[in-house]
Image: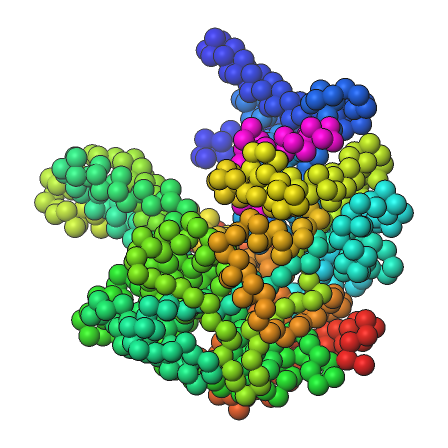
Amino acid sequence: MKRMKAVSVMLAVIILSCSVLAGCSSGNSSNKESSNAPGGSTANSGESAGAIKLDIIETGNNLPTPDKDFIKQAIDKAIQSDLNLTVYASGDDYKNQLNVRLASGNFPDLFQVPDRASLKQFVEQGLLLDLTPYMDKLQPVKDFIGDESLKKTTMDGKVYAVPKAPNIPYNTYWIRKDWLDKLGLQPPATTDEFLNVVKAFADQDPDGNGKKDTLGLTSSKISAFAPIFGAFGVGDPNTFYVKDGKLTNSLYDPAMKDALGYIKKLIDTGAVDPEIMANTGLQHQEKAIKGQAGIIWIDWPNLSKDQFTEQIKKVNPNADWIQLAPPKGPGGQYDGPFDIGGTSGIYAIPKALENNKEKLQKVFDLLNFVSGQEGSMLVQFGISGTHYNLDGDKVVPTELMGKEAGFTWLYQFTGRPEMTYLQTKFAPQTKYIEFANSQPRIQILNGFLTNPDGYNPADAGRFIEEEFVKFIYGKNPLTGYEGFLSTLESSMNFKTYMDASTKQLEELGYGK
Amino acid sequence: MNQRTAVHPVQETAPKPVLVSEFGRNIWRYKAFYLMLLPGLIYYIVFKYIPMYGVIIAFKNFNMMDGIWSSPWASPWNKHFLTFFHSPYFSQLLTNTFLISFYKLVFGMIPPIAMALLLNECRIKWFKSLIQTLTYMPHFLSWVIIYGILLALLSQSSGLLNQWLKDAGGEAIPFLTSTSYFRSILVGSEIWQNLGWGAIIYLAAISGIDPTLYEAARVDGAGRMRMIWHITLPGIRTVIIMLLILKLGHILDAGFEQIYIMYNIQVYAVADILDTWVFRTGLQQLNFSLASAVGLFKAAIGLVLVLGSNKLAKRWGEGIW
């Protein structure tokens, strides 16, 4: 009995001390992190010895491990840093991670801000460092992205973040040329022809396997119909644009009802992917590659990059995807809308870095470096002599660029000269890039907007999407559209949002 | 129980201080046990009770830079609760949460018990362990994988089941995008996932039943069904009730992970639950105060249900069953 007692006491002591030790060790590691930052003068210490560690998070994919990441190594060498980049494949995941990190005070040193609405929230929470007083230290960045761009991250006259240089649109309809040929059809030029082709792709067995197992049109969510909305002269649901000199929200555009009526007709044919609203990630791309669908609304990289053309050919060597100009409709001919207030990324520095001058300077160094000649070339094309050679001013890619340098865009924190970049790096895709870029598009202004208090964008967004789905699937008749608008205003506070948005856009000089 | 009450009256005549020191002496006497209890207690205090102070952000306008203490109080104090109660989706969210949870509870209760009974009656050992392994494997699959499997089977355009239906001349059924099927899919996949896992507990309880009861019954000429009905089931009654009570406490957790992965805009009307709403409205938009207000609301209801059902079960314990 006595011995048992002794054993149990010992056990308890061991368990206790273990938990205490665990507590200490975790405390230690967090101490290390914070003490690491101010310590170590980097001035002339050379390589990684005194390098300052920079934590960076953003959305992205295909980042190699640090030992294979030659961009990280090159940047670390150039500015004496120790970059620790973490990327998240899904935008939703990233948003969550970021919010949790910010809320727990575990700030990254540089991070991507999902959109302008989030930027406003972060600014209101006092999380972001006001960059205005540091602008002279960021001269190379300023020169690189241009003063005009900086307006997109300016709030109440203060610059809170660095926007990437503006992007170009990527998305268009893509269509199976070989299916068209097999059925003796022309690429559809009008909305009526579009309807016929979609129907024919589902009904007339274009893949010739004797089964009715093909879909006319697929994509992800309501944006599948972006060029259709364009054909009726309206933007995607709940977008702002200037039409006939007047500021308009697509929901209140009289042509919206017609567009919905046409989309309903499309869906009634039964030829549209029934899971179009449930497709997430790249499920629609998969359906296209597998030869299940004949038309898809997608960005050119996801259908014409080498790896995907390979997959397509593997399924069917005769498959031939071509881009399709937006069909002409009663409201004109526009491909999916292009947000002129948007950026392809906003990067901010947490306010917490204010007191850590050395680290802050290092972040500035980083931003300046990737904006400068040498750094910009590095993050665009890789290492000179390995991934590309210079022929005068022209960048000549080597074979290694295609193999190894696909991820370098993750380090383009201030963007890139879009067109030359794409044409060099994606030379075989140049015609697709130019095609997507040259389509007429409705210029929407949502990127300039921030949400007013008392408006819950999650609830309102859900309501709009849900009701739209009911309209196009015929669960609610279109005669109920006015009723939908008044419910939206009365129970979702949409009026407040409309008023605030109109005011914000008018202040910027739109629709006056 | 009876022994202690028998001893009690003797001590009652003693003055109070003695009782206190009696308590202290008891602690001293069983100090090894209390010491062993200590780590557990500390765990609960450090990881379960201390973090509870964070719940006050439900009554504050939480600002990340100010932190929990310095964030300003919400005015009125129940501002975030009101935002939640006044959301146009409040009643729908609550209904969905209760219904999905209730279905899972009701339909999910019998299958594991039946499974455990069947396994218990199975006399071929290798077959029994094969079935057991097979049925509890899904428990270790994440919902993403299960959704992938479901998609391959039930997808309206390319799912196996729908291919068969179409080949047989029928119409494809939109299992995953139709409001009339979605809840059944949710409940069904949950039951499938937890069938074998749930049976383990019941099997363990069954193995604790005194085998002499069965022998006696056999001598009295009882068949297998009789024995299940009169010995096995009453034998695991307490376990069934206990699990039921535990699950009732979680009735407002209708399975965030599963629903978040499986739902889409077409089935929001029947699938959107409190947790998914909190995720979209609270966490994704930095309304942490709102998120914790809803969390507190859920916890309060869960507590009431656990206490209530426990009381009810106590009454049953005396009564019929």
The N terminus of chain B, quarter of image: top left
- Toward the top, the furthest residue is A3
Between residue A350 and residue B52, name the one nearer to us: A350
Image check: A177 left or right of A456? left
Give the residue drawn at x 68%, y 50%.
A415
Is there any visible trace of residue B216 in the rendered image? no
Image check: A472 left or right of B118? right
Q: Is residue A235 above or below residue B37?
A: below
Residue A98 belongs to magenta span: no
Q: Position of residue A256 (x, y in %)?
A: 58, 84
- Toward the front, the furthest residue is A392
Q: State the extent of the magenta-drawn residues as a range.
A: A60-82
Give the residue drawn at x 60%, y 18%.
A17
Between residue A112 and residue A191, name the one nearer to us: A191
Exactly how many numbered labels are in the figure? 0
Q: Position of residue B3 (x, y in %)?
A: 45, 31
Give the residue drawn at x 62%, y 65%.
A458
Q: Position of residue B67 (x, y in %)?
A: 77, 45
